[in-house]
Amino acid sequence: MQKTYKIAVLPGDGTGTEVVNEGLKALKAASARFGFKLDLHHYDLGGERYMATGETVPDSVLEELRKVDAIYLGAIGHPDVKPGILEKGILLRLRFELDQYINLRPVKLYPGVDTPLKNKGPADIDYVVVRENTGGIYTGAGGISMKGTPQEVAIQDMVYNRFQVDRCLRYAFEYTKRRNKRNTLALCGKTNVLTYVYDLWERAFHEMGARDFEEIRRDYYHVDATCMWMVKNPEWFDVIVTGNMFGDIITDLGAITQGGMGIAAGGNINPDGVSMFEPIGGSAPKYTGKNVINPLASICAGAMMLDTLGEGSAAQAIENAVMWATANKIKDLGAGRMGFTTSEVGDMVAQQVAG
């Protein structure tokens, strides 16, 4: 009997619908080839719904999303909605409510894709960042007093407890072990200045590693040094684990080294619950409806989703199809510069997945 996965599809805003449509082509081709079914449920969460109804994520929709196997997201961000409303109301709410406490971001240079790093190729840029996703400075702890006066005070606190740190570290150690590439996990922090929070991270890191993961080599880098080595010697890295804010920063640096936002995908992971997968490039409203946006990041996000669901062979088939396309067909990942339309790229990859 074929296994069926219930997938919530959230195309979102701008070009999100376009890239999700192409990702679904690859997912459907993989499901047909590898013998599983996709039960797709579409939701109109995003800027248009918010402007029409004032809703971001209604409680009733949230309860439905708790019952799916995974969420496949396009993009969130609308030019007519004040920044922060949709991001906090949809993206952050889903991450927090569904306890997606890991943000998983592969940094991998595919064949044929240009990198701004001199003399570096696919053999040099192939690592993964594990970012803690529901704690730290992004949770909104803090406040403003005397707003609008010369004495205005703004406070935003970086808060972590041992439980949050331990579960992120354990995921990172276990992921490094499964990846089985260099078996090296690097903690990215700032122990010389953020002496409370990253002292906790560093102690927990070494205690857990020494006790439960002796086979995994442990490295530590300050976040500024991490950025430097990501540019100078990316081949040093296997898996990097870090807190929420530093992870947000270094993964965008990683994305540009792998060819830009058009190829970078990410997963918001709850290992025991519902996870959400997305391209990281945003809604790109100026390209909406032009059929020129690069859908490869969305296609790769779909592959990550299948891998997390346990369909590793199907996920690898999609990634192989993307690598074939970048090596043989697509010579520029920029919107309108690919040499193919958005839908043509989706068709190309899907046909390759189908075999």
Image (spheres, rainbow, N blue to C red):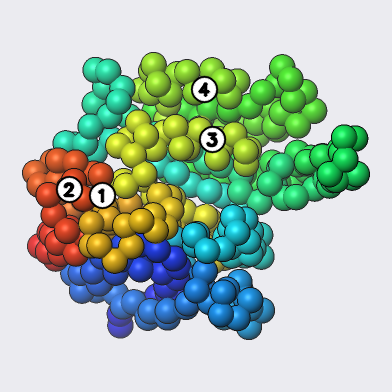
Q: Residue at x 38, y 79 (%)?
A: 40
**Residue 226: mark in rendering:** 4
The reply to whether the C-beta atoms of the residues labelled 2 and 1 are less than 8 Å apart is yes
Q: Residue at x 8, y 44 (%)?
A: 328
Q: CA distance from mark 2 to mark 3?
A: 27 Å
**Residue 310: mark in rendering:** none
Q: Residue 353: percent from the left, percent from the top?
A: 17, 61
In this view, the mark in front (4 or 1):
1
Q: CA distance from mark 4 to mark 1?
A: 30 Å
Q: Which image quarter is the C terminus in?
A: bottom left
- The residue at which mark 1 appears reads as 335
Of mark 3 and mark 1, the one earlier in the sequence is 3
Q: Residue 105: percent from the left, percent from the top?
A: 45, 44
Q: Residue at x 68, y 27 (%)?
A: 202
The reply to whether the C-beta atoms of the residues labelled 2 and 3 are less than 8 Å apart is no
The reply to whether the C-beta atoms of the residues labelled 3 and 1 are less than 8 Å apart is no
In this view, the mark in front (3 or 4):
3
Secondary structure under the numbered disc 4 in the rendered image:
helix
**From the viewer's perspective, is residue 234 above or below residue 159?**
above
In the displayed structure image, the side of residue 71 where residue 256 appears, left or right: left
Q: Residue 340: percent from the left, percent from the top?
A: 13, 54
